[in-house]
Image: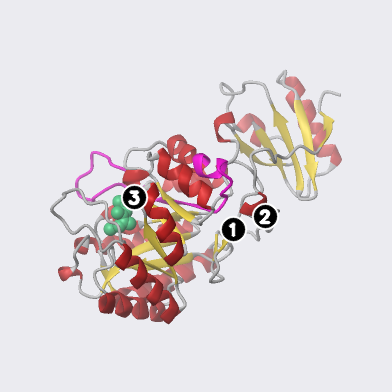
Amino acid sequence: MILVLRKTVTEQEISAVCDGLKELNLTGQVVRNERGAVISIYEDVSSLPGHLFSRLPGVDKVLRLSPQLSMVTDERLGPITLNSGVVIGGNRAVVIAGPCSVEGRSALLQSARKVREAGADMLRGGAYKPRTSPYDFQGLGEDGLKILQEAREETGLAVISEVMSPDQIEVATKHIDVLQVGARNMYNYDLLKEIGRSGHPVLLKRALSATINEWLSAAEYILLQGNSKVILCERGIRTFETLTRNTLDLSAVAAVKGLTALPVIVDPSHATGRPDLVRPLSRAAIACGADGLIIEVHDDPSSALSDGEQAIASGELQSIIEDVRAMENLFPKVEKAQPSFQSESFAPSEKLTVSTGCCNS
Ligand code: PEP
Ligand code: MN
């Protein structure tokens, strides 16, 4: 367990925390660096309730770490800056919008213009489509990626698209800014490892029935290969409910924000399958700390080749983005320090090791 101490913590408070740990028969190790101090507890504290620690003086956050997630929980992870200048995980929520699939050149270029006019930061569009039925539209493949690149050149919007297998990564990285791992591929470990090796920014969706631990473990696979540019995306999980396509797990968003410094965004479109629920859940996502949204938008949802039933019409996007801005003004993010590394310098061996004292010494 790690106790993250407040920036303003005093030496008296640190020794009071150490006294509190001694009373619990625990040993804490104080670890300091230029950005603050934490106390690491190495004993098994799984049976002890978190409030025993969160109530100690000067303690800001209590992180229960699984040694299996040592990269994901690294405090130095943080905002991701794309080549286009978009920052994901900073103080301003990022809105990604566009059709489920790239359906053709002129349709996508038109969507891209509308999405930009509405105030979105990035454009989405699937080129390789994971469809439940093999008879459904499977996507335009590389041609779709080229169309996305053209849309980026024209509008300046960064573009994101899904890859389903390791052999699609090389071509995708030539054309798009962010790779997407879809819910159905979160467990595709060869894909995760290869994306990790590519170093390319990646949006990692939570699988339909993945626990938070499984989702973070999938991120750990990517980080372990030296790629720290991972954005997590909660897109709804499968439950007994049938009125919505999935159930948006906002508690996972808030919980994961407390476990990792990686950006976490929300997909209200796949979470609900209903355009009328996109606005309220977008508001809720921002209110509970999400770093952004990915929303399916179509110029004519009734004629969409995939997921038309859940797309909002382009005209609605702008007012949803206005709601997002209003929500983030209401609940502003605490200023985040820039991470002390980017993926180039991110290696498994690099850990916080600056130790200056032991509670029991
Ligand atoms: C998509 O983004 O179009 C998609 C297929 O999403 P998911 O993987 O979340 O189902
Ligand atoms: Mn879709």
Q: In terms of depth relative to the viewer, which is nearer, 118 or 11?
A: 118
The magenta stretch spans residue 155: no
Residue 79 is labelled as 1
* Residue 81 picture quarter: bottom right
Q: Nearer the viewer, mark 3 or mark 1?
A: 3
Q: Which residue is mark 3?
A: 164
- What residue is at 44 percent from the left and 44 percent from the top? 192
* In the rendered image, the vertical position of residue 264 relative to residue 280, given as above or below: above
Question: Does residue 321 appear to the left or right of 333 in the view shown?
Answer: left
Of mark 2 and mark 1, the one earlier in the sequence is 1
Q: Which residue is mark 2?
A: 339
Question: Does residue 273 appear to the left or right of 177 in the view shown?
Answer: left
**Residue 271 in sight in this render:** no
The span from disc 2 to disc 3 (Cα, nearest Å) is: 30 Å
Of mark 3 and mark 1, the one earlier in the sequence is 1
The image shows residue 134 at horizontal and vertical percentages of: 16, 50
Ligand 1 located in image quadrant = bottom left
Of mark 2 and mark 3, the one earlier in the sequence is 3
* Image quadrant in which the C terminus is located: top right
* Residue 68 picture quarter: top right
Specify whether tag 2 is near ligand 1 (CB below 8 Å). no
Q: Are marks 2 and 1 in contact (CB under 8 Å)?
A: yes
Q: Secondary structure at mark 1?
A: loop
The image shows residue 105 at horizontal and vertical percentages of: 28, 76
